[in-house]
Image (cartoon, rainbow, N blue to C red):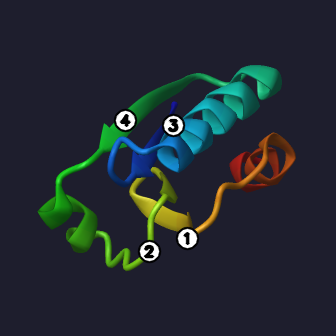
Amino acid sequence: MKRLQILGADCPNCRKLFENAEDAARELQIQFVMEKITDIDRIGDFGVTMTPALAINSEVKSQGKILNVEEIKTLLL
C-alpha cells in the first residue's frame, strides 16, 4: 500500500495536487491512503521549503508545483 502525502496549507494548489494524486492512484488501481499534512512543523520535518509538495511513503517527490495525473502516475510506478 502506498501512502500519498500532500504537504501544504489547505490552499487551491494543495487541493488540486491532492485530487491529481488520488486520481493517479485510482487510475493505476493501486492500494493507497491519502494524507494531508498542513502542520508547518511536520512539513519542515520533510525538508520541504515550497508547497504544495507530494511525498510518497514519506519520501518527497515534488515541491513547489502541481503535478498532473500523468506525472504522478510515473512516480507511483
Q: CA distance from mark 4 to mark 2?
A: 18 Å
| Position in image of residue 60 (x %, y %) | 48, 66
Question: Quick one: label 4 or label 2, which is nearer the N terminus?
Answer: 4
1 and 2 marks in contact (CB < 8 Å):
yes
- What crowding class fits label 3: few (fewer than 14 Cα within 10 Å), some (14-19), or many (20 or more)? some
Q: Which mark is residue 50?
A: 2
Residue at the disc numbered 4: 35
**Residue found farthest to the front:** 12
* 54 left or right of 16 in image: left
SS category of the residue bearing label 4: strand
* 43 left or right of 21 in image: left
SS category of the residue bearing label 1: loop
1 and 4 marks in contact (CB < 8 Å):
no
Residue 23 is drawn in which quadrant?
Answer: top right
Residue at the disc numbered 1: 64
Question: Label 1 amino acid?
Answer: Gly
| Position in image of residue 16 (x %, y %) | 60, 39
Q: CA distance from mark 3 to mark 2?
A: 15 Å
Question: Quick one: label 4 or label 3, which is nearer the N terminus?
Answer: 3
Question: Quick one: label 3 or label 2, which is nearer the N terminus?
Answer: 3
- What crowding class fits label 1: few (fewer than 14 Cα within 10 Å), some (14-19), or many (20 or more)? some
Q: Which mark is residue 15?
A: 3
The residue that appears at 32% across and 78% down in the rendered structure is 47
Question: Label 2 amino acid?
Answer: Met
Mark 1 against mark 4, which lies toward the viewer? Answer: 1
SS category of the residue bearing label 2: loop
- What crowding class fits label 4: few (fewer than 14 Cα within 10 Å), some (14-19), or many (20 or more)? few
Q: Which mark is residue 30?
A: none
Residue 71 is drawn in which quadrant?
Answer: bottom right
Q: CA distance from mark 1 to mark 2?
A: 5 Å
Q: Nearer the viewer, residue 19 or 33?
A: 19
